Amino acid sequence: MKPRHFLRISAALAGAAMLAACAQIPRAAEQQPNQTLDISPPFIAEIVADLVEPWAMTFLPDGRMLVTEKRGSLHVVTQEGTVSNAIAGVPAVDYGDHGGLGDVALHPDFANNGLVYLTWAEAGEGDTRGAALGRGRLDLDVLRLVDFEVLWRQAPKAAQRKHFSHRMAFSPDGQHLFVTSGDLWMPESAQDTTNNLGAVLRLTPDGRAAPGNPMYESGGVTAELWSWGHRSPLGLAFDAEGTLWELEMGPSGGDEFQKIETGRNYGWPVVSYGDHYRGPGIPGHDTRPEFRPPDTYWNPVISPTSMIIYSGALFPDWNGSVLITGLTSRSLIRVSFECPLAFRDICEVERFPMGNRLREIGQGPDGAIWLLEDRDPGRLLKLIPR
């Protein structure tokens, strides 16, 4: 077995535990100094493998991982760090900027049907592109996705390579597949319910609009909508009670974490706790109560990329917490539903700088936490208790 290497994380760096601003706080409060706590990391980070621009991971029943690489490769990776050859049968991707191969998920009945779901940026006509979702049966003996089929597409496609989002989460009962659909760098699309952009979608496992959706009777892509008014949702997870939570990148400021409620409009781009990169500011959520505000947000941004709601035994103090990876923050961030501040319920309570941009987080079968770095090579890291 190859020698193990460990990532050094100093207690001084890891001691930044910034308590995030809540949606209910007036915007003037954003100018107040962040409160901090001195916290040493409760984990050791083991360097397990190097990959090429990894984007997402999921665990197979035997403990191995399926890992996507943005340029279009899917691999089986063991917990000891052995990386397989690329799996055949993966769709062609439109690589560049935010585009490429994205999320990976197993069908809830994978043990019997072997179905693997992928999302990716797909080329269209006239130099356009959009996210797509498909599935195929995984044959591990020959490393191939068999009978791969496209189930869903963003509509319309756009002439850019940003804000595909395309994260997936199956409902706890396995009956619905939730998908995040970014605004494709067209902010106005998030308020237009005649498309399926800037939204969280509820589909059946075969990619169709799910009966019972808020506008199901309208038909077409409108029938897919579960919530809308989102910018670039990059995290999606259910908690132990079956509540769906979402994480998204804001503009210049205003990254958001929030509960997803059926049929609610989350306000982008009409309101935000951030501002446009260029041009005028954006009114805050407190100015438009008809829009559902975030449960917590960040200024400055953390550039969130993924999240889990931890449920393992290795880090018992983190059970039920939200663990978030970030790009510009280069950190693992913990959000608690039991905020120590009396005037808010949900907030950031710990932040552990990891030295590099982080793309993905996963929880292993034994409760270990796994991270993917956003780089080439992008390291696969395993976090275990100190």
Image (tube, rainbow, N blue to C red):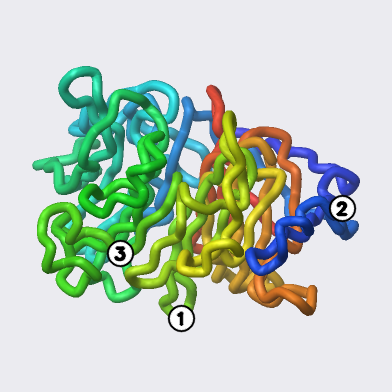
| Residue 334, horizontal then vertical, whole percent | 67, 60
Seen at 17% across and 52% down, the residue is: 221
As drawn, 3 above or below 149:
above
| Residue 287, horizontal then vertical, whole percent | 58, 62
User: Hey, what amino acid is under mark 2?
Assistant: Pro
Seen at 44% across and 75% down, the residue is: 243
Residue under label 1? 241
Residue under label 2? 33
Q: Quadrant of residue 366?
A: bottom right
Q: Quadrant of the N terminus?
A: top right
- Secondary structure of residue under mark 1: loop
- Secondary structure of residue under mark 3: strand
Mark 1 vs mark 3, CA separation in Å: 19 Å
User: Hey, what amino acid is under mark 1?
Assistant: Glu
Q: Quadrant of the C terminus?
A: bottom right
Residue under label 3? 226
Q: Nearer the viewer, residue 25 or 184?
A: 25
Q: Nearer the viewer, residue 169 or 366?
A: 169
Is mark 1 in CB contact (under 8 Å) with mark 2?
no
As drawn, 350 above or below 93:
below
Seen at 53% across and 55% down, the residue is: 307
Q: Nearer the viewer, residue 81 or 206?
A: 206
Is mark 1 in CB contact (under 8 Å) with mark 3?
no
The answer to whether residue 8 of the structure is visible from this angle is: yes
